[in-house]
Image (cartoon, grey):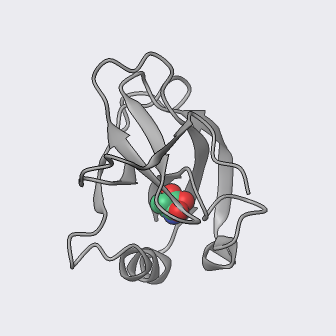
Amino acid sequence: MTLVFVYGTLKRDCSNHDFMAGQEFLGEARTAPGFRLYDLGGHPGMVVLPDDTDGVAGEIWAIDADCLARLDQLEGVAEGWYRREPVPLLAPFANRGIEAFVYPHDVTGRREVGPVWRE
Ligand code: PCA
């Protein structure tokens, strides 16, 4: 099992949540400050933003290897669209090396969403 932090369309009640079918929800979580969401067109990208003070809200899931592979494909990890990397989370998930799909590209001109993605 792998723990992942999801903050966008993979969350409960969101458009890609079917990808989490059969996996285990462990709880709501929030990153440390330094991350913000931007609207990439129906889905958010979480970017590193050093002067952010709020962080990003999301969910922790325990997922199996098949699910992880499907998520990597969905998020275009091999193509460098999103990068799956550890993000600092607040308690009770702090210091556990939990990964999220971070958006590593320029967000100039994208709508700033703030800390919570809603559909
Ligand atoms: N799906 C992933 C990354 C962005 C998105 O919409 C997630 O929910 O974490």
Count the marks: how many? 0
User: On the image, which quarter does residue 8 sit in?
Assistant: bottom right
In-image side of 44 versus 80 (left or right): right
The answer, for residue 113, to whether it is visible in the render is yes
In depth, the one of 74 and 90 nearer the eye is 74
Give the residue displayed 54% in from the left and 63% down from the top.
Answer: 43
Residue 114 position, x and y percent, is 55, 34
State which quadrant residue 84 falls in. Answer: bottom left
**Whether residue 69 is situated above or below residue 5 in the rendered picture:** below
Give the left or right position of residue 102, taking residue 55 as reference.
left
In this view, the residue in front, 62 or 79, is 79
The percent coordinates of residue 52 (x first, y second) are 39, 21
Of all residues, the one furthest to the right in this rendering is 13
- Quarter location, residue 53: top left
Residue 64 percent across, percent down from the top left: 49, 74
Q: Give coordinates of residue 91: x percent, y percent.
A: 53, 23
Instruction: Pick whichever, 92 or 70, lies toward us.
Output: 70
For the C terminus, the image quarter is bottom right
Residue at 60% across, 78% down: 19
The vertical placement of 86 against 66, above or below, is above
**Vertical order, 70 against 44 (above or below):** below
Residue 98 visible, this orientation: no
